Amino acid sequence: MSDLLRVESLTKHFAVQQTALGSRLGGHVMAVDDVSFTVKEGETLGLVGESGCGKSTTGRCIIRLTEPTSGSIFYEDRNIRELRGKDLKAFRRQAQFIFQDPYASLNPRMTIGEIVSEPLVIHQEGTRFEQQARAKELLDVVGLNPEHINRYPHEFSGGQRQRIGIARALALNPKLLICDEPVSALDVSIQAQVLNLLGELQHDFGLTYVFIAHDLSVVQHISDRIAVMYLGKLVEISDWKALYAKPHHPYTQSLLSAVPLPDPKQQRARERIILEGDPPSPIDPPSGCRFHTRCPIAKDICSAEEPKLREVAPGHSAACHFAALNPVPIGIARPAEFTPIVG
Amino acid sequence: MAGELLKVDDLKMHFHTRDGVVKAVDGVSYTLNPGETLGVVGESGSGKSVTALTMMRLIPMPPGKIEGGEVLFKGESMLTMKEEQVRDIRGNRIAMIFQDPMTSLNPVYRIGHQIAEPLITHKGMSKKEAHARAVELLEMVGIPNAASRARDYPHQFSGGMRQRAMIAMALSCDPDVLIADEPTTALDVTIQAQILELMQALQKRTGTAIIMITHDLGVVADIANNILVMYAGRAVEYGSTDQVFYEPSHPYTWGLMDSLPTHDLTEKSTLCPIEGQPPSLLNVPSGCPFNPRCPYVKEECRTTVPELRDLGDGHLSACLFAADPDFKRSAADCAGVTR
């Protein structure tokens, strides 16, 4: 499989406005800082991290809903940052977005037929009659009753609305779907329905997903490869199995060990790494490794030098000075002594 | 254990609205013993929070109306007691923390002042004593530089710290029961782990009983002794944590467990969602409320309302067939997708 998407040194800084009271804050929020990864055709890349780590901003930059500060994004070997006008519109047929909040992302004054066929109208695809027929077909694909085409969003439940959002994203037969927390607003039983639907659609239409979520068990379920972000940086990327079995970065390890397992015996048996404190502000991130202020194994080098993302096993990279040393299984306390790898 | 602390018996809270009667809570029973943790799980609209609010007499009536049942706190009825007596219990003997600490803290008062308030009201402390105690409490919940942070306003705290402050406030009067309504839902997972650990450590120290209301089965697996599963305003299953997780005996509980992405993070699992949508509480199906979504539904389920029945060892289930040894969860019924 070839790379459908290649993100190179993606950076997005938001300027902080002066406040209304006239105090000068200045500075920049380093939302995404030098992030690189690739997504192969037909695979699902999971993007995980806590709030404020830059995962949504990364997703939005990929389809240029947000203009990156620097870096390149290649889609089928074309840098989409250079696309203008017609070319950009053509790219957007290929790449679509599913939003987190199924209440805020559907216009309450449009019928679901209008919502689902709007991409077809914008891209002047077919006659009105054909658009209507396509909308019905799409509703059927996502498991909604095509008869309900003239209803309004408020007549649907959260899970059904998310299906409408998915139908809209599929309208133009895209290849790439950026899913930004598509199931986090849903109850578990409905969440499972939507996850299964996304799995089926990928299988039927050969879709490629970038799946953004904070729930590690959801990401594990749907992803082929997973990228972990912390405070605007990519800290670890690997295929899902290696990431869960052998996490190398201490942040990934503590993140995994913090997830409460829905299995009381396992939960009681394991030891957990509880991180101290809160994530620092992305306006003034810590020097060196951004995780060093909360890291249980931080050494002097961590605050002085920024660790590069390096390969620790085939297809598995981590950005930690100590990464290649003997990864520790989830939830087991780490040995006391570590020596940094020089170079 | 030495007598039950809290007993809820067939509690019913209905809301009379223009559109009809919303049966938000329609027959919930459980008991809570001193020092134990009860996990209440269920999806949105299953009546988990309304049950707690009804107990605390925090539901405005009308539109709410208690249609039956009883809540006994140390043998006294919470539902018939005078408002002054309830006020003496609320925040003092039974305290609550909520999902969103920003909306439950008052933005215009300093944190220390807000924690001191219940101490002045319930314990008759002077302002000075109460403030000193507030600082101690902030230290106890792990806020660094507690003395100076007590002078901060809520917006100066992060989400995790606000929830810690809420816990400090709730525990200020050394309550017998702490009701925690989705206390970690708005928090990141590493912060959630901190808060859960804090609650467990404090429980060990103070012996407070906890009612943990949540939709996250992982959270209850972590901290609960007993679990109550709710669906459409009713209790459908009750038992010890191990009973509910390892011998679930209601098809809804089976469905919940099978909807979870995974029990083991190193193995891909199959998801078997529950088909359909939860019912509208305006129009709950007749018979068993779960019958339209239940893959094992039989004719009786549509007509007979199942009672919560004991299967032995204090494990209760509100399924007509739960006691039938041949009635088992079958994996073959799952139409899920394996990836």
Image (cartoon, coloured by chain):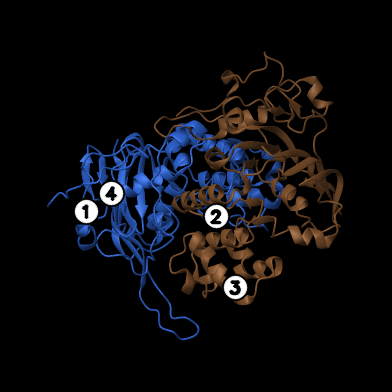
Chain colours: A blue, B brown
Packing grade of label 3 (10 A; few <14, some 14-19, many >=20) is few
Chain of the residue displaying label 2: B
| Cα distance in 3D space between marks 3 and 4 | 69 Å
C-alpha span from label 1 to label 2:
32 Å
Quarter of the rendering containing residue A88: bottom left
| Badge 4 amino acid | Asp
List the residue tagged with mark 4.
A77
Residue type (three-letter) at the residue carrying disc 3: Glu
At x 76%, y 30%, the residue is B308
Please name the residue shown 79% across and 55% down the image.
B57
Question: Taking B202 as reference, is B289 left or right?
Answer: right
- Which one is nearer the viewer's eye here, B290 or B115? B115
| Crowd rating for badge 2 (residues with CA inside 10 Å; few <14, some 14–19, many 20+) | some
Residue drawn at the location 58% of the way across and 61% of the way down: B166
Residue under numbered circle 3 = B129
Image mark for residue A308: 1
User: In this figure, which residue is indicated by the disc labeled 2?
Assistant: B186
Q: Quadrant of the C terminus of chain B?
A: top left
